[in-house]
Every structure is written in structure tokens, then in C-alpha cells.
Image (cartoon, rainbow, N blue to C red):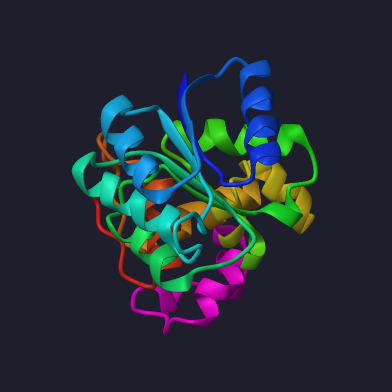
Amino acid sequence: MRVVLAEDLYLLREGLTRLLEAHGFTIAAAVETGPDLLSALLEHRPEVAVVDVRLPPTFTDEGLQAALAARRQIRGLPVLVLSQHVQQLYARELLADGSGGVGYLLKDRVFNAGQFIDAVRRVAAGGTAMDPDVIGTLLQSSARAEPLQRLSRREREVLGLMAEGCSNSAIAGRLTVSDGAVAKHIANIFTKLELAPDEDANRRVLAVLAYLNGSPATSR
């Protein structure tokens, strides 16, 4: 699985490169600026991009903007943002096209290699891996739209854990309920968000994206 990595700090970039390679990933490019990131993504079209938000030359939002620009040309390009900051506007734009393959982790809350590698693989496979603090920031900044308001408190809790990338059994453990109860909540979520069964759409991902983006979900 090929990765394009963007990180301006040399030691962190080298460390991430070695960590990813140790877990079977191929580093197609490891860059340190926004323009270099966009060029690398368009040239290599990797299975996943791991991107810092603040890159040279201005250290504002070049990394995320480059990823968004590439994603407009390569629909569904999986992007895992690894940052110290939550950029609400661009994070929401990253979620807006509903194509999945999106993650946003905060550097100081990645506690072990397994957590990080699992997030990279999940995003590469078209899923989501969102830090709970990122989820909270996005939800606080947006008005909940119909039909999201139809969800019960427990259903929103389940959907929030789905956004983190938790499996049904992991959600059951976190909420201290049975696997069957989780499955029932998820079925209710799909119904309330009007996500009919569709072989071409991952309803779990669509529900998460609708939840985080504050907009109604749609089946494809």
C-alpha cells in the first residue's frame, strides 16, 4: 500500500516513514511543503495520504489545502490528517463530498503505533478515523440539520463512536451494552438518516459523514 506523507519536521517525518515501512507500507513520497504535497499526490495517486495541516511556506493550512486540491482531481483520495490543530472550515470541506476515506487525528492524542497504523489502514479502505476532540469541535460549530435531529441521545453516541472508527463490539464495550443493542441502534440510525441498502454505498461511512458535516445523508 503506497503512502504519500507530508510533515515539515525532519525527525517526525523520518519517524513516520520508518513506522509505516515497518508495517508493510511503501512510502511513495515524503515531502515537507504544501506545493510538494500536491505535486506528489497528483503524480503518485497513492492509496492514502498522511498529511500535516501546517506546512511551509506560511505554516497556516497548506497541507490541508493541498490535500483538498488533490481530492478534487482524484475523487475519493483517502486522506488522514495528522495535526496539532483542528481547522474547522477545511475539515468540514474534507468531509463534504461524502466519498469516505477521511481521518483527522491530533498528534498529542496518538498514544501508540497500533492506534496510528489502524487509522491509516481504515482510512485507506474508505472508512473514517476521527479524534473525539475533532468530532466535538465540528459538532459544536454546526447546527444539526434534519434528519440528524431525529437521532436519540444514545444513537448520537453510537454514531460518534462509529466516527472514531470503532467496531460494533468496541462500541458495545464503550457503552456497556450488548452487541445486539448496538446493531439495533445502527439500524435505527440508517433508517432515520434515510440510508437505504445500496451495494454501491457504505451506509456506515455515509452516516458518519452526514453526522460530522451537519448535512442530510444521501444514498448513492
Residue placed furthest toward the front: 57
Q: Residue at x 67, y 23 (%)?
A: 18
Residues 103 and 12: in front is 12
In the image, is residue 139 above or below residue 158?
Answer: below
Horizontal relation, residue 125 to residue 112: left or right: left
Q: Is residue 21 left or right of residue 138?
A: right
Q: What is the number of callouts on the image?
A: 0
Question: Which quarter of the picture shows residue 217?
Answer: bottom left
| Left or right side of 212 for 175 | right
Is 136 included in the stretch rendered in magenta? Answer: yes
* Segment tinted magenta in the rendering: 134-159
In this orientation, which residue lies closer to the viewer: 23 or 122?
A: 23
Residue 14 on image: x %, y %: 66, 31
Q: Where, by quadrant of the figure, is residue 95 drawn?
A: bottom left
Residue 190 visible? The answer is no
Magenta stretch holds residue 37: no
Res. 161 in view:
yes
Residue 37 in the image, given as x and y percentages of width and height: 39, 41
Is residue 62 placed above or below 87 in the rendered structure? Answer: above
Q: Residue at x 44, y 63 (%)?
A: 91
Q: Residue at x 43, y 79 (%)?
A: 149
Q: Main secondary structure of the magenta part?
A: helix
**Residue 196 percent coordinates (x, y):** 28, 50
Q: What is the x, y in percent for residue 29?
A: 45, 27
